[in-house]
Amino acid sequence: MRMPRPRPVMCRLFILPALLLAAACGEVQGPAVVEVGRPAPAFAARALEGGPASLQALRGSPVLLNVWATWCHPCRDEIPALEKLHREWGGRGLRVVGVSIDQGGQEGAIRAFLKDFGATYPVWLDPEGEITTAYSTMGVPNTFLIGRDGTLLWKHVGPVKETDPGLRAALQKAVAGG
């Protein structure tokens, strides 16, 4: 027994409404382009210690931006490495910044977590996960090195190791002003 072939008209009936809906909503935008050598996306949040925080306010300094959460086990593994980088490179101008995507109202738990792991670098709060859209991340941790001029110099998915040769070369370039 032969199966009847689908009629092209039926397919068009499903595709046409989708195209009309997309056209009615305006231009459909894809994910942000986050590539080494291109400008890093703008991002602003609230600092754990209060007040606004933004990459724009840090322009002129290289920034190691780490996206993490307290519930992320690989993030726990990298906190000591980030702290070592903060201590080693901070005197040369590097700003290490953690962006927590934990739910709102978790400030106390985040502070306790940072204390338990000995982290002293600044942490920004992003309970809505806006950084994940701005930087096209899937999961945590993700780390981005942004140059003094706002150019993305290096990016990494997964836990950071302070001995990573690619990271160390990018850090040298970043603190030298490149």
Image (tube, grey):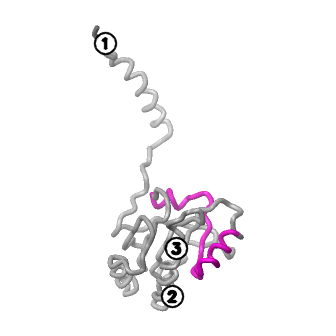
- Tell me the quarter of the image containing the C terminus: bottom left
Report x, y in % for residue 38. Answer: 36, 67
Numbered range of the magenta stretch: 109-136
Residue under circle 2? Answer: 87
Image disc number at residue 3: 1
Circle nearer the N terminus (2, 1): 1
Residue type, numbered disc 3: Gln
- Where residue 99 appears, as percent x and y from the top left, is 56, 69
Is residue 147 found left or right of 79 in the rendered image?
left
| Residue shown at the point (68%, 76%) measured from the top left | 49
> Is residue 116 found left or right of 146 in the rendered image?
right
Circle 3 packing at 10 Å, graded few (<14), some (14-19), many (20+), is: few
Pointer 1 or 3: first along the chain: 1
Say which element carries label 2.
Answer: helix
The three-letter amino acid code for the residue at tag 2 is Arg
Q: Give the numbered dot on residue 56.
A: 3
